[in-house]
Image (cartoon, grey):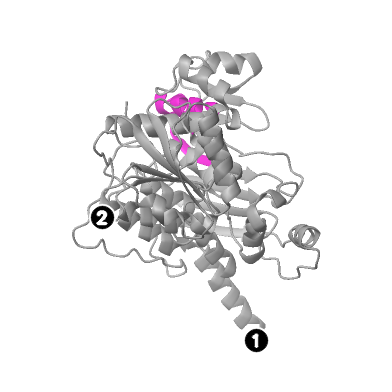
Amino acid sequence: MKLRYLLMAAAAFALLSCNCKNEEKSYIIKTPVPERPAGQESVLGLTAEPLPTVRIGVVGVGMRGSSAVRRLTKVPGAEITAICDIEPDRVAASCNWLVENGFPEPECFGGDKDSWKGLCERDDVDLVYICTDWLNHAPIGLYAMECGKHTAIEVPAALTLDEIWALIDASERTRKHCMMLENCVYDFFEMNALAMAQSGLFGEIIHAEGSYHHNLEPFWHEYWHSWRLDYNKANRGDLYPTHGIGPICQALNIHRGDRMTVLTSMDTDPFNGPKAAEFYDGKPCPDFKNGDVTSTQIRTAKGKTMLIQHDVLTPRPYSRMYQLVGTEGYAAKYPVNVFCLREKLEADANSIGNETLIMGDDAKALQAQYSSPILTQELEDVAKKVGGHGGMDFIMDYRLIYCLQRGLPLDMDVYDLAEWCCLSELSRISIENGCAPVEVPDFTRGEWDKVKGFSYAL
């Protein structure tokens, strides 16, 4: 009997040790790609009629949305024509602020859970800017596109694969932009490192890391009716992956020459989660689902890898863990900005050589040589003055309006939204199946290698 079990264990190990390059191995959990409906076409590089003035309806003016209203007034070409929130006092506060600061009074909607439909149906709204709780992101985005509006949806824009495919189909069918408001791709270090990577400074990028490490224990009460804590109580997996994965997907040219093919996830037990729930709810929470730390590894079609982590319940210092690992160099943002470049040994031109660690003022001097093509000094100065996570929120809004005004493709399309959001459900599937490998769908339906490299429309 012992021999039998040894043979069974050896067979299982051999199966799980198979090279992940072979996507057809039977142990990978498949995720079907629905056939593109007749009459739909890809929205890679989607352009739309230029909008000299982009008329915006903002849905959700709580913690994020109210700051977005004020920020958007600083963006050239943007005009807020409608505001909606289920809480009428929030609508009144944002509308009053606009009027008091000399802007036209917007149409106000609120007081009902479906009030946003009236905003989406208005003729004087070109873009619906969605900052509600997560559960309402996709439904509002879908309705807005069906009403002929472009959509910009806060993170995460979709929670399930069904929502993701629905948003893709709606964008392809209506030919309307559906962009996720992922601000971290516009942080200064990430844009700078991307420019370095695209110049070849790091050689070929072969691995990247990203995360959302942010202790939310002091902030759970700021979310309306504690919806975010409730979602963590009810769900396992990486519930907030987009800040970490977004910037590294751009550096790895995901669906622009490469694509994610398989992932595997694991999590810790929920040690701190039940304590947080009990503190805010006033009663024990024995069935808290989300682990304190969730880790996801991803492999791409071109043999690259990613590591993504989620941690909102430990005292670990804030970090998005941003790292690019290339054949000839390395960049990291946390805890301090650092670069490492391979140098040839002068004594032997054929030698691989040593690495040079670059930090502090030397790092700043190196960064100054590689500016992002979308970031002028004037825009950087305005962004830092207006603010919003140090200025990256303003650059995000600025680029969105800039591209819509000129009829250009947006920096992020609906396939970015899909790839960055899908980790939530796919990581849960992996965890609930013993950390099994899970196939990552090709959301472009076979067109992931059509565009060669990430670039900005200028």
- The C terminus is located in which quarter? top left
Residue furthest bottom in the image: 1
Whether residue 406 sits left or right of residue 339 in the image: it is left
Residue depth check, mark 2 versus mark 1: number of the one nearer the observer: 2
Viewer-closest of 422 and 53: 53
| Total numbered labels | 2
Three-letter amino acid code at the position of disc 2: Arg
Label 2: which residue?
A: 173
Q: Is residue 77 above or below residue 81?
A: above
Which residues are drawn in magenta? 186-209
Three-letter amino acid code at the position of disc 1: Met
Q: Is residue 75 above or below residue 322?
A: above
Label 1: which residue?
A: 1
Secondary structure at badge 2 equals helix
Mark 1 crowdedness (10 Å alpha carbons): few <14, some 14-19, many ≥20: few
Secondary structure at badge 1 equals loop
- The N terminus is located in which quarter? bottom right
Viewer-closest of 350 and 405: 405
Where residue 6 appears, x then y in whole percent? 62, 76
